[in-house]
Amino acid sequence: MRLWALRFQPFVTFDGTEYIRFAESLLAGKAFVSVFPPGYPVLVALARLIVADRLGAAVAVSILCGVTLPLVVWLLARRAVGERWALCAALAVALHPELSRFSALSMTESAYLIALYLGLLLVATGRPLPSGLAVGAAYAIRPEALLVAGALGVGGVRGAFLDRRGRIALLAGALGFVLIAVPCWIYFHHTQGVWTLTPKVSTLHAPTQDWRAAEPHAGVAPEAGADRFDPIRRARAHGAEMLRDAPANALKHGRALLMLWPWPLLLLSLWGLAVRRGIESLALLVLPALPLLGLAAHPRFALAAIPALTILAVVPLTRRHRIGRALAVVLWSGGAIACAWAHMESFVMAFDGSLVTERRAGQWLEGVAEPEAVVMDRKPFVAFYARRTHRIIPDDPYDAIVAGAVRDRVRYLVVPEWMARQMRPQLLPLLVDASFRQREPRLEMIYAGADARGSSLAMFRVLQPGEMKLGALPVVDSRGYVRGESRGP
């Protein structure tokens, strides 16, 4: 399933561009400033020692973790439903379309899932130190593991009051967790300049209603680090609006969850939860937290709950009552069909859309650009494939964008057609008006590309004061382009 999914994911993802650059900085012995934790980039850096291709190394980590997850789920599920029925849970995890797709991406989900559920398995088998290390590793990959770590800590404190063995287990588990967490905290302080549990604390705010409000603007200073990364301050500043928007946000995330786990399967999971509340249930803690975060209601944010919901959904199948078991079989069958139907189209689509044009443009630019060149674009794909530094285009007036690019010594400006039409219409004249391009003394078009989808982009050299245009015709790459499907450069 995962190799099948890999066929449809030939491109880097948006977040993947940062994870891979993060890993490359670590390999070069340099700190990398990012709101993302270092766990997944460390794994990618280790994979680069074996896999030469930068994207291939990131995907190899996800594939390896993804194909291991069904085994971990089987080992965890057999404690709840026995070895035979645990195969149902493992098979469901192996065949779930989105779990398979995220195992083929340069994203953290696959690595996070294996670390999290391995940690829960080790807790269930009474191995506190390894479980602490595994949960710590999950936290180093994605910060929501703090919810599970906190719940395990509360349970450990309760057990510590009962006997000496409980106190030893609590200390061993805490030791394993801090051995991983403390280096992360030190790294956050080194790169962000403040002590924080996670830079992702910045997501503690109500969802942005207008996407333009979140767009960058030149001259607008970012939120101060101490305020941005302090959960108490952010709760005080944004708590009222978070609570106000939580009900509506919960409905959106609920619909996203139903895309991953349709209602027949969710009914089975709730049935299983009512019968048995095992250690796997701790992975569900992410679900009530999502409505309080400033995250888009994307199904991937609930993906960590799917293996736990799978184990719980198998519990009703073990009922001895024939009617109950028959009902469970019907719900499983209907839910499996609904899940496959819901993901039939997305499974065969590239996660961030086709990036054929962006990849070609980046590969061309890699061969001609100066080593330290800065590439300005709304998204980082061209810069990634060119192996150059990316800077986002601010949502400012046209002249402010170009003047800022000249001032900051940006060397290349990339203007994709879709971006100019949807997000930066002030740049559209650069694509559709040749006379406008000729009158602009600060930009010279050097490349135009389009592909079979009709997607197109133009690339401009940003000229410094006193630098003249070369006057050469731009390179045009229109392999597969179908005339009439686009009005690009």
Image (cartoon, rainbow, N blue to C red):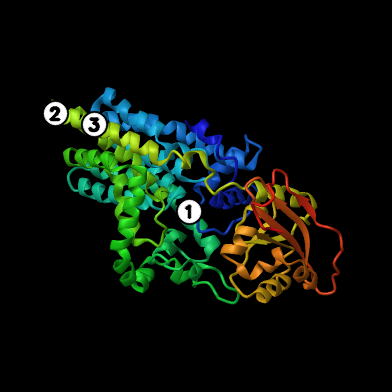
User: Please, is residue 33 above or below residue 329 in the view?
Assistant: below
Q: Which residue is mark 2?
A: 323
Q: Which mark is residue 380?
A: none
- Residue 180 is left or right of residue 389, and the answer is left
The CA distance from mark 1 to mark 3 is 46 Å
Q: Are marks 2 and 1 in contact (CB under 8 Å)?
A: no
Which mark is in front, 1 or 3? 3
Q: Residue type at mark 3?
A: Val
Q: What residue is drawn where x is 72% and y is 52%?
A: 449
Amino acid marked by disc 1? Cys
Q: What percent of the width, then of the height, locates residue 161?
A: 19, 48
Q: Residue extending furthest top?
A: 84
Q: Calculate the distance from the C-alpha at mark 2 to the C-alpha at mark 1.
A: 51 Å
Mark 1 — residue?
184
Element under disc 1 = helix
At a point 74% along the width and 63% down the height, the residue shown is: 411
At label 3, counting other C-alpha atoms closer than 10 Å, the crowd grade (few under 14, some 14-19, many 20 or more) is: few
Q: Earlier in the sequence, mark 2 or mark 1?
A: 1
Name which of mark 1 and mark 3 comes first in the sequence: 1
Q: Residue furthest front?
A: 484
Q: Nearer the viewer, residue 160 or 447?
A: 447
Q: Position of residue 206 (x, y in %)?
A: 38, 66
Check disc 3 and report the residue beneath it.
Answer: 330
Q: Nearer the viewer, residue 10 or 280?
A: 10
- Residue at 40% in and 32% down: 95
CA distance for labels 2 and 3: 11 Å
User: In the rendered image, which quarter is residue 166 located in?
Assistant: top left
Numbered disc 2: secondary structure:
helix
